[in-house]
Amino acid sequence: MALTGGIATGKSYVRTAFAALGVPTIDADALARDALAPGTPGLAAVIDRFGATVLGAGGALDRQRLAALVFADPEARRQLEAIVHPAVRTAIDAWFSTLPADTWGIADIPLLYETGRAAQFDAVIVTTCPPTTQLARLTARPGMTLDDAQRRIAAQLPLADKAARANYVIDTGGSFEDTDRQVRELFERFNGAPTRAPRFSPPVSNV
């Protein structure tokens, strides 16, 4: 199963809630960070494309500096994604292959629809919330200006479109308790019908 949604719509919270119920999960954002760690081919490719100015004092990637570049330039963002996404895709595919046949897991993939991966999964959960809530959450992050937040939201497929394509929607606009209830209901639904539990379908190719 895949979990996606817009930035600042509660994906991480929902993934953690499923994990607390015993569901295996994997986080594409964490994999993307690993793909650009010091000494990796991914970081070398980023330096080659964007220059050493994207590095911090210790030689690690300065993510805020890189983000400022790519969210101001759609072509630069696409070039970064071309570096990161193949490594993340490979890691997720490998992770699902390790799960027992009778176990379902969740991959948190923020750009699931944008990268055309939704068809690989038997079901997709989308987290959503009111646009005003999404913007408020995002601008509350350290160093995030209103312009930065609006650019990041605009870089993704509109939230309403993601929700319309989803098999299941979790609305995180209310209380934590309400979000937990929705997670628990889906968990019980899938566990109560194991023959219909979502399964991951490996891609025919990585093209």
Image (cartoon, rainbow, N blue to C red):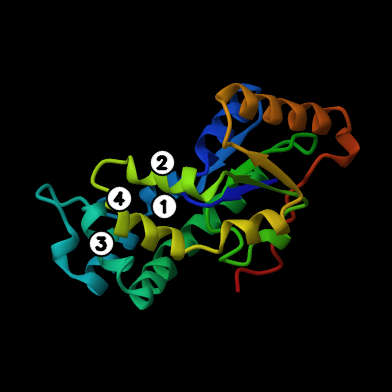
Please give the label number shown on residue 68: 3
The answer to whether 203 is drawn above or below residue 8 in the figure is below
**Disc 4 target residue:** 37
Question: In the rendered image, is residue 121 in sight?
Answer: yes
C-alpha gap between disc 4 and disc 2: 27 Å
Kindly check if marks 1 and 2 are in contact, taking CB atoms under 8 A apart as contact: no
Residue for point 25% across, 62% down: 68
Using residue 115 as the reference point, say whether residue 8 is left or right of it. Answer: left
Between marks 3 and 2 in the image, the one whose residue lies nearer the viewer? 2
Quarter of the view holding residue 155: bottom left
Residues under numbered marks 3 and 4 in contact, where contact means CB atoms less than 8 Å apart: no
Labels 1 and 4: the sequence-earlier one:
1
Question: Which residue was labeled with disc 1?
Answer: 32
- At label 4, which amino acid type do we have? Ala
SS for tag 2?
A: helix
Residue situated in front as seen by the camera: 73 or 199: 73
| Side of 152 relative to 206 (left or right) | left
Kind of residue indicated by mark 1: Ala
Location of mark 2 (residue)? 137
